[in-house]
Amino acid sequence: MKRIVIFASGSGTNAENLIKFFHNRENASVIQVLTNNPHAKVLDRCKKLKISALSFNRTAFTETNDVLDILISKQPDLIVLAGFLWKFPENILEKFPNKVINVHPALLPKFGGKGMYGMHVHEAVVSNKEKETGITIHYVNEHYDEGAIIFQAKCEVKNTDSAQDVAKKIHELEMKHFPEVVNDLLN
């Protein structure tokens, strides 16, 4: 049985989707959710889904080995960033090479980098008059959104679309493709 640990910072819709997708599967399951936000809605989702969830602060993540030690104890086969906003520390990336992935709400390398997340991305896509956008699932390295691309899915951006319209399309792509790509990586 493959073991998945999810990192999230916000509402947790992607985390919940992954937890439900792998619930009662024979090949893998989500064993832990970690968040840098003690008020994140993902904690409530995990409680309802009976999944262990912990919050941590920046010191535990970047200045000590506290989060690394949790990961070592959990022995994950894959670490999945699902709306996690902090840059991942090198000590974790070194301990888990090619085992940390992220979903980004744009077609990288466009609209990536520090500060490019959520509505910031969708607003940039609309203001740049892009004809298409999508999601990118990629490996995480020491730079924001620069790891090797695993998968991309595209959608059309109409000239009448608002940033909220784009966000809805991106969310649909994430819900459809993210669990399948995680499953493929574990197999």
Image (cartoon, rainbow, N blue to C red):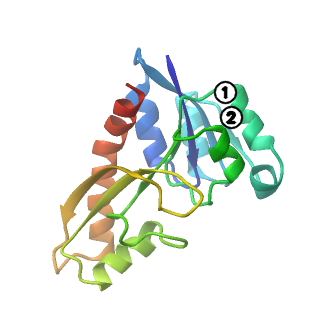
Q: Position of residue 44 (x, y in %)?
A: 59, 42
Looking at the image, residue 128 lies above or below residue 145: below
Looking at the rendered structure, the kind of residue marked 2 is Leu
> Which element type, helix, strand or loop, lies under badge 2?
helix
- Identify the image quadrant of residue 175: top left
Rendered image quadrant of residue 125: bottom left
The residue positioned 61% from the left and 38% from the top of the image is 96
Residue count near mark 2 (Cα–Cα under 10 Å), binned few <14, some 14–19, many ≥20: some
Residue 50 vs residue 145: left or right?
right
Q: Is residue 26 above or below residue 57?
A: above
Residue sitting at x 67%, y 27%: 74
Q: Is residue 85 above or below residue 132?
A: above
Q: Which mark is residue 63?
A: none
- Quadrant showing the C terminus: top left
Q: Which residue is mark 1?
A: 74
x and y, in percent, of residue 150 in the image? 36, 47
Q: Are marks 2 and 1 in contact (CB under 8 Å)?
A: yes
Residue 155 against residue 60 in the figure, above or below: below
